[in-house]
Image (tube, grey):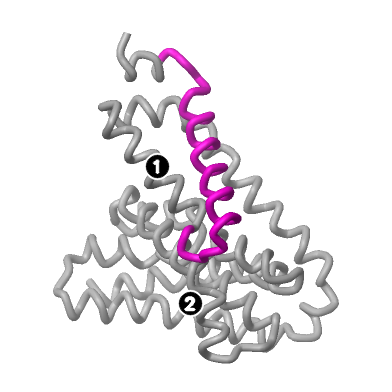
Amino acid sequence: MNANSIILNSATVGVVLSMMTYGFGIWLRGKTKIDFLNPLLISIASIIAILLIFKIDYQSFNESAKYLSYLLTPATVALAIPLYRQLDLLKKNLKAILIGVASGVLTSMSSVLAFCVLFRLSHENYVTLLPKSITTAIGMDVSKELGGSVTISVAVIIITGILGNMLATTLTKLFRIKSPIAVGLMCGTASHAIGTAKAMQIGEIEGAMSSLAIVVSGLMTVVGASFFAMIGA
């Protein structure tokens, strides 16, 4: 029996393998304290290496690991908990928060437009990249609705999140961002849930604001992406 058969005949091998590689990433990050050794990045690289070494096709692995994706939506909804704890802070800074998130969303989609014009990418590639900074659960639907490649959109969203997670601390120091609200909004607006994971490590306020930014930026992108898609038509 080959590796593909073993995985196809098991409903848990892919899940266990994914959790083990992610756990290894967490351990490695804890030992080295290096931001660029992101657990998700380590997990992805490890899974790719395992699939190549044992000649396992992606479809077989995905059939066994797809159950993890069912946790994506409830995990995103659970981010409302830290936000609820900082509800008073949200009310006091509502105007600044909305303006900050709107600026981030506008910058994200404008940069994609400029990038695609500069490199003369097709309209399909353009709309595929538009939802790069919002959570996968929303970004997949946006990409599909606009006629983009959902698979590539997911990859771009994950890469964006990983980069945001790795660079968050460096950027806050570089630009001397002191406000925990600003740090949280930056993480959530630019790099969705993966950035929010980093924000929660920084502090409770940062995590709460980042959770809010995921929802608000997602809604703004759903509306704004349709407009930007027409600009780049």
Question: Regarding mark 2 in the picture, which secondary structure is present there?
Answer: helix
User: What's the amino acid at mark 2?
Assistant: Val
Question: Quadrant of residue 213 in the image?
Answer: bottom right
Instruction: Give the percent coordinates (x, y) of residue 135.
Output: 51, 58
Name the residue rendered at 18%, 80% in the picture: 118
Name the residue rendered at 82%, 72% in the picture: 87
Marks 2/1: CA–CA distance: 32 Å
- Left or right of residue 27: residue 79: right
Asked whether residue 188 is drawn in magenta, I would say no
**Residue under label 2:** 105
**Which residue sits furthest front?**
31
Q: Is residue 65 above or below residue 29?
A: above
Q: Earlier in the sequence, mark 2 or mark 1?
A: 1
Asked whether residue 29 is drawn in magenta, I would say yes
Question: Quadrant of residue 90 in the image?
Answer: bottom right
**Which residue sits furthest left?**
120
**Which residue sits furthest top?**
1
The span picked out in magenta is: 9-37
Q: Is residue 123 above or below residue 118?
A: above
User: What's the amino acid at mark 1?
Assistant: Ser
Instruction: Give the percent coordinates (x, y) of residue 63.
Output: 41, 26
- Left or right of residue 21: residue 146: left
Quick one: quadrant of the C terminus?
A: bottom left
- Left or right of residue 153: residue 203: right
Question: Regarding mark 1 in the picture, which secondary structure is present there?
Answer: helix
Could you say which disc has been placed on residue 46 in the image?
A: 1
Tell whether label 1 touches label 2 (CB within 8 Å).
no
Could you say which disc has been placed on residue 190 in the image?
A: none
- Left or right of residue 108: residue 137: right
Q: Is residue 155 above or below residue 9?
A: below
